[in-house]
Image: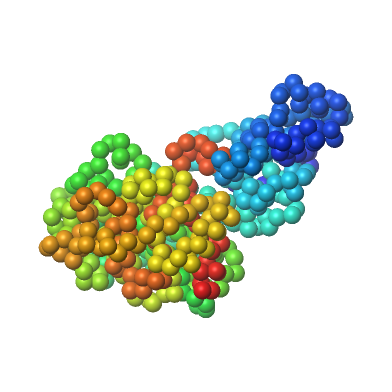
Amino acid sequence: MKFADTRDKAIPAYCVEQDRIFEKSKSFDAVTKDWINQNNFSGSFGQSVLCPTEKGDAIALLGLGNKNSRRRSRFSLAANAKSLPAGSYEIVNPEAVENLEIEVLGWLINNYVFDKYKNKKDSQAYLVKPKIIDANRVLQFAEAEALARNLINTPTSDMGPEDLASATRNFANKFGADYSEIVGENLIAKNFPLIHTVGRASSQEPRLIEIKSGNVGPKVTLVGKGVCFDTGGLNIKPGRSMSLMKKDMGGAANVLALASMILSTSMNIQLRVIIPAVENSISENSFRPGDILTARNGSTVEINNTDAEGRLVLADALSFASEDDPDLIISMATLTGAARVAVGADIAPFFSERNEVSDILKASGAQQNDPVWPLPFWDPYEKMIEPDTADLDNSPSGGYGGAITAALFLRRFVTKPNSYIHFDIYSWSDTNKPGLPKGGITQGPRAIFDALPKILDI
């Protein structure tokens, strides 16, 4: 994802609102007007046309639609980019585009291609860097998005726990951050029993990955679920449900994307990233339904479904995160299908004890075209995660409020719940949409990045 290499030979592009096309067309020459009429260009959302001029060159018209049509998609310019022929384009009236930085980001993201395993010719419509935006910030966002997408889209054969650790180590080296990991049987010795139990059946050893950067400012800890593949364990998933399980480390990818945004700027915080990296496989030493496990913080957990493994590895990671007494803990995980049922695939639901934090995150999500929405830590549901034979149940029966009960489970492992935010994300685009090519995506990092200084200030 990049801007056009040069302004030389870039095609001038005019952004046109649907209800102002007649007014705008008055400024074009007769050849261009005739071409507009022949191609029925009306300025509708996502409509683009390459027009000849009397001088023998070309201009592009990019339809922005009207405000109602723009509300139906996150990225207007990305919709235009999808229908343009390959080449370089320079927007000559950027003032016509609302929220230009985010729209430009959408164009860049739209050019993302996961071609690690496929030869593909370059057929992109590249955008000349607009002079009136903070282009470095846009590129930092685009690079963070590409990082997460590449991690999520890579199949588990090349993105198991070892590979995720290697990618995180490379990330830490890039930003001069400290890297460490605890692997295999050392997890038992260092008291991470749930991480070890979930990952012990895999040929790749489970591990706890940690990076740290900064020694002044508020302490912010990001915890990302790194389940590199989830068979469901002995409660094996059906084939249809297993097909996307390479993305079950989407929480890890998203916290690394957020960390990339933070470390690319001068944000004055002490950043810590914790990733429990495992593969939930099946072998003779898989953990079983009915087992009762003891977590890092001493809580006992009855296993009623081995497919509810994400909350187990996060439990140990959140206990570990709390021991440093951070000012803020944020967890991100592809945790429950119930969250998708509640808000669909496009919106990232989150949980916070504080209404003011929820309001800040919602506003930042709207500003960054990164939609998030609060769900409640509903205390009356606590009894649903309390079985008769242990402190906690990893998969309550009944089927109701699954995203909430999972969040309540995680909250039990955080010592300061008022300083905890949990995101239950999907991290995948099922179809090709403007700015959201099919495959792995981020959900929440831009919203969190924008909101973080305000949250830490309250």
Residue 276 visible in rendering: no
The quadrant holding residue 83 is top right
Instruction: Using residue 104 as the reference point, say whether residue 308 is left or right of it.
Output: left
Residue drawn at x 39%, y 57% as measured from the top left: 375
Residue 455 spot, x, y in % from top left: 51, 69
Residue drawn at x 65%, y 48% as measured from the top left: 104
Residue 441 spot, x, y in % from top left: 48, 47
Instruction: Using residue 109 as the reference point, say whether residue 393 is left or right of it.
Output: left
**Whether residue 127 is situated above or below residue 185 in the rendered picture:** above
The quadrant holding residue 9 is top right
Residue drawn at x 59%, y 55% as measured from the top left: 367
Q: Which residue is more in the foreground, 208 or 58?
A: 58
Residue 121 spot, x, y in % from top left: 58, 33
Numbered label tally: 0
Q: Which residue is more in the foreground, 164 or 21?
A: 21
Residue drawn at x 68%, y 49% as measured from the top left: 98
Q: Which residue is more in the foreground, 187 or 288?
A: 288
Q: Which residue is more in the foreground, 49 or 154?
A: 49
